[in-house]
Amino acid sequence: MGDRWRVEVDRGVCIGSGMCVNTAPGAFALDSARQSRPRCSETDADEVVLAAAEGCPVEAISIAVRGSGEPVFPPED
């Protein structure tokens, strides 16, 4: 993978399940309102971060390639 990713959480969709934090505690945290947020808005491509996004029960996490904006998750249809 060698890319850099931009990671975002749609806080209007996030239900605070904590699945992302359990899967990738180094990449996500819950704030005082139990809303998820990325610890860093950009990260190296990482299978654990992707697994956290894929495991989000409401698909609140989006990942795109930094620079090009090409979606990593959710994939384009």
Image (cartoon, rainbow, N blue to C red):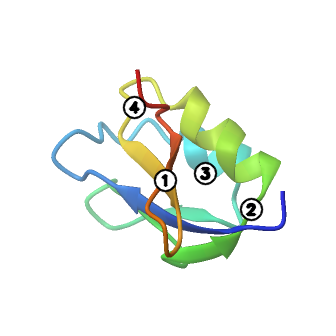
Q: Which mark is residue 8?
A: none
Locate residue 34, reporting x and y percent.
Answer: 34, 54
Which residue is pictured at 49% across the width and 75% down the height? Answer: 67
Locate residue 1, reporting x and y percent.
Answer: 84, 56
Q: Residues within 10 Å of mark 3 (few under 14, many from 20)?
A: some
Query: Amino acid type of disc 2?
Result: Ala
Which residue is pictured at 70% across the width and 37% down the height? Answer: 51
Q: Which mark is residue 21?
A: 3
- Nearer-N-terminus badge (2/3): 3
Name the residue nearer the viewer: 67 or 5.
67
Q: Quadrant of residue 37?
A: bottom left
- Nearer-N-terminus badge (3/1): 3
Q: Quadrant of residue 76?
A: top left
Which residue was labeled with disc 1?
70
Q: Which mark is residue 59?
A: 4
Query: Amino acid type of disc 3?
Result: Val
Query: Amino acid type of disc 1?
Result: Glu
